[in-house]
Image (cartoon, grey):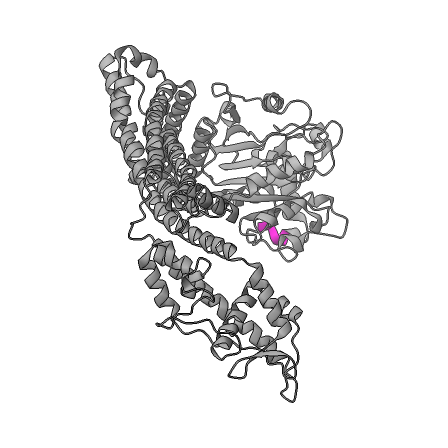
Amino acid sequence: MDKLIPTVNKLQDVFNTVGQDQIDLPQIVVVGSQSSGKSSVLENLVGRDFLPRGSGIVTRRPLVLQLVNVSRSDNNSDADTEARAQFLHLPNQVFTDMSEVRREIERETERLAGSNKGIVKTPIHLRISSPDVLSLTLVDLPGITKIPVGDQPSDIETQTRNLVYEYISKPNSIIVAISPANVDIVNSESLKFAREVDPKGTRTIGVITKIDLMDRGTNSLDILTGRVYPLRLGFVGVINRSQEDTLASKPIAESLRGEAEFFSGHAVYRTVQQHCGTATLARVLNQLLLQHIRDHLPSIKTKINALISQTEHELASYGTAAGDGGMAKSSRLLKMLTVFANEFSSSIDGSAHEMSTAELCGGARLYYIFNDIFAAGLDSVNPTASLTNSDIRTAIRNSSGPRASLFVPEIAFQLLVKPQIKSLEPPAQRCVQLAYEELMKVGLSCGTNEMRRYPRLHARAMQVVSDLLRERVGPTAAYVASLIAIERAYINTNHPDFIGGPGAITDLQRKLDRKRRESARKVSRIAQRQKSVDGDAVIVGAEEIAEAVDPTEIDDAVDDVRSRSRINGTFDEPPRTASGTLRRPGSGSPLGSGPSGQGKFFNSFFGANGRRDVLHMGDEPRVNHSVIPVPNRLSHVSGDGTALDDEAAALSAQLSADLTVSEQRDEMETSLIRSLISSYFQIVRKSIQDLVPKAVMHLLVNEVCENMQNRLVEVLYKDDLIDSLLQEDPALVEERDQRAAMLDVYKQAFAIINEAM
């Protein structure tokens, strides 16, 4: 047990040499408001007058005070009883005059904190060895102040608050909260601070100062016994030296004897001697610190052991210093170039040792580019969005020359589809560029810490990577462009996935039939809505029908009525052929074979086969469209009782007449061309979406990975470059030295703990 506190003192000294604060060492932190008697308590514990005094804030840097108990020698000479002080920043100088210690504290404070009364968090380490002290390690913090006075900084409260919290918030710190007895404890700033970081009061001990200055007839018994504010570690009451005693240089030993006489002779406090006196406080703090160290030393040892392993790993990543021999340097250079090339390849195939978990990188990023970015770019291209009906009709007419065409020219289809295929090239080239940029990022992320020690080597290696990528990105982009050109060079209308002429016509006929059925249902709904209560039909105005149904839909519905009316004799029925096909009036040809008939367009679009398919399709029964009956008016009545208002029939006839035979043909041709372009474009898009990633992987990614090491060795592994490439970065050399120093500190600390345990 006797070795525990010196062990912590050694650890504090060792860690302070490198400014290390990762280890939370057990310590006692003294907190109190300004003029609460904090300095007097510390001087009483030491038994010497050594702290600076004055008005305003005096302690402006944390003071780590290590009290070491030394045994008296047998001769009991005066020299043996003298306290010896030693500062960590002056390791070879020993102070025996406490006034010199005070002046050195002031000088060291002003050296870092200046003379403007500001505070800094860098501590001063002071060790005092004496037979009159118990072994303790205390941290004296600046007094808590509220209002800046004199030349104190305006934010002095914030500065002190932050500094106090930094120390007392550490779990291994025991908090000594100083509160004057002549101020109500509910106003204690030190207890308020302690409660914020230690709400259960498990590591806070209260010290009540200036008990002798309380009003006559009052005492601190309830506070000392924990009835007012309970703390697990309890309270201790002490008496401070008065300002008069300080000015008169009254010995502290004499003041301590007066304190003991006060408590032993007091009618109230003599009943609670275990809570009173500086000697009691020193003994309690010593026991608490010993217990605290014993409880936490195993965990500290474990943490130091982990830091040793971590620091050794970091130090190994920096490598050893470059050797003087040429063979050693050349071997090191070749090894680093090989490791760099291997890391580049492993980052692509996903086998790298250290992969980012925050974002996609390397091969995973390439997959995302191919299957998300590139695919979305192709899907966003609409092959017919930029084609107007006028563009399509103009292309059809231009491809026919001075002659009227019987069929839709295939040249028009090719003329229109090739520019749409060309629109796939920008997304494809963008895919190549994104893959190139990702490979550049992979190159930047490669290279161990050992290579980064040599900035010239790393820069030249990245230059080689950049040159190699630029060499390969050009042919890759050219090949991707050739893929688009190949697709445009030959339009394969015999592709098994191409819809073709008959398929396009079938699809178009299906849409027209669906459109007619929808038109008939709309007209039927209007009729049902306007029936009278007694079942008689109400006249339906042509304006209402025109508003409810598209003119082309009205024409389709009325045309169906007229067909049935002719069959029933209402209209003049055109003559039929022997096979039952309707003949055009005044003509010997079937109705569907005339130049203006829809069947003629279907039959002639792709020749005889198409004609047979469409005639067969046209024989399907027509839908029975509902027609609005209008009795007591001039109506067109069919044999089954259906009728159409003259006005509506006239409007339908007019709308049908407005859409000329030529316009109907143009509309049909435009729709067919759009369907054919969309079908063929989908085939080309699938092909490009499959071939471009393969081209990028083969011509860019794989080529770079396969040739990386050879190119690095070819360009950089030269005798005249080795010395210049292996010049270490001074910043990294300094960082490596710091890591080496930290490793030594951790090993020393580990050895110190082993000795104590």
Task: Tell me: 755 left or right of 231.
Answer: left
Task: Tell me: 184 left or right of 592.
Answer: right
Say if 277 sits above or below 314 in the image.
Answer: below
Along the viewing direction, whichever of 439 and 462 lies nearer the viewer:
439
**Could you say which quadrant of the image residue 8 lies in?**
top left
Question: Residue 104, percent across and down?
Answer: 59, 21
Along the viewing direction, whichever of 530 and 754 lies nearer the viewer:
530
Task: Tell me: 709 left or right of 408.
Answer: left
Q: Read off the magenta span.
A: 270-275
Say if 372 sits above or below 501 in the image.
Answer: above
Q: Is residue 384 visible?
A: yes
Residue extending furthest toward the bottom: 534
Q: Residue at x 44, y 57 (%)?
A: 595
Residue extending furthest toward the top: 720
Question: Residue 309, percent across and down?
Answer: 33, 36
Question: Residue 680, percent across and down?
Answer: 37, 49
Q: Quadrant location of the C terminus?
A: top left
Q: Report the label total.
A: 0
Q: Is residue 315 visible?
A: no
Magenta run includes residue 273: yes
Q: Quadrant location of the N terminus?
A: top left
Magenta run includes residue 153: no
Question: Residue 524, percent across and down?
Answer: 56, 76
Tell me which secondary structure the magenta stretch mostly adopts: helix
Along the viewing direction, whichever of 371 and 483 lies nearer the viewer:
483
Task: Tell me: 636 left or right of 478.
Answer: right
Along the viewing direction, whichever of 138 and 472 lies nearer the viewer:
472
